[in-house]
Image (tube, grey):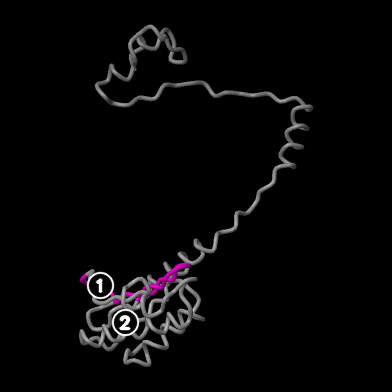
């Protein structure tokens, strides 16, 4: 290290001189700084101990959505849709119910059905969100769409939702109308 940039000793630095880092053409150097020693009195140690004792660590609960996404991530690690057996993915919102048959290898959606599609939404006349009846109609629609394309076997992806209620109704209706899973 050049002492001209650093001053008379390696522990002091002259701010008016050019930077020692520029002097070495982009190579990074470390300035030697003496270790800092802090001396506490007995009074300071007592205050620090009281402050450390009063520190609280609070756990933050995950939201229902975060828990669902974590469940879905665990499921997706084990479940992939192939050309022979595509994945039947289900998503439930407060207003609608969606499902699609996906080939994960080719990254294509092969078939889809939801309560937002015109034929189903007009037939159901939903006012307060999807019901079990709506889920059964969506399951029937996805089964018909799959059978038209020659798909009979699927892997069911519940999307992190509990297999109960609307999700179960959709799965049962799809099974009744010809899908195998």
Residue situated in front as seen by the camera: 131 or 2 = 131
The residue located at (37%, 90%) in the rendering is 175
Position of 57 relative to 164 (above/below): above
**Left or right position of 67 against 27:** right
The residue located at (56%, 59%) in the rendering is 62
Q: Which disc is residue 109 wearing?
A: 1
For residue 33: magenta?
Answer: no
Rendered location of residue 44, percent (x, y): 75, 27
Rendered location of residue 56, percent (x, y): 69, 46
Which quadrant of the rendered structure holds the C terminus? bottom left
Residue at the spot of label 2: 142
Cα separation between marks 1 and 2: 12 Å
Q: Secondary structure at mark 1?
A: strand
Rendered location of residue 7, percent (x, y): 41, 8
Mark 1 crowd level (few <14, some 14–19, many ≥20, 10 Å Cα)? some
Q: Quadrant of residue 147?
A: bottom left
Rendered location of residue 83, percent (x, y): 22, 79
The mark closer to the camera, 1 or 2, is 2
Q: Secondary structure at mark 2?
A: helix
Residue situated in front as seen by the camera: 65 or 145 = 145
**Left or right position of 124 against 27:** right
For residue 91: magenta?
Answer: yes
**Left or right position of 12 against 122:** right
Magenta extent: 89-106
The residue located at (46%, 75%) in the rendering is 130
Residue situated in front as seen by the camera: 130 or 18 = 130
The residue located at (44%, 71%) in the rendering is 92
Tag 2 or tag 1, which sits nearer the N-term? Answer: 1
Mark 2 crowd level (few <14, some 14–19, many ≥20, 10 Å Cα)? many
Which quadrant of the rendered structure holds the N terminus? top left
């Amino acid at each position: 290290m050049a002492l001209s940039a650093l001053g008379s000793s390696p522990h002091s630095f002259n701010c008016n001189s050019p930077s020692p880092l520029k002097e070495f053409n982009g190579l990074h150097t470390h300035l030697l700084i003496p270790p800092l020693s802090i001396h506490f009195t007995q009074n300071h140690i007592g205050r620090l101990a009281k402050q450390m004792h009063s520190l609280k660590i609070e756990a933050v609960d995950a939201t229902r959505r975060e828990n669902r996404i974590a469940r879905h991530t665990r499921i997706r690690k084990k479940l992939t849709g192939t050309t022979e057996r595509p994945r039947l993915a289900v998503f439930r919102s407060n207003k609608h119910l969606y499902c699609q048959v996906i080939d994960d290898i080719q990254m294509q959606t092969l078939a889809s059905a939801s309560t937002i599609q015109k034929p189903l939404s007009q037939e159901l006349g939903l006012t307060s969100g999807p019901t079990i009846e709506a889920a059964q109609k969506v399951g029937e629609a996805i089964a018909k769409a799959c059978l038209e394309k020659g798909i009979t076997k699927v892997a069911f992806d519940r999307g992190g939702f509990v297999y109960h209620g609307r999700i179960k109704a959709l799965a049962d209706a799809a099974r009744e109308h010809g899908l195998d899973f």
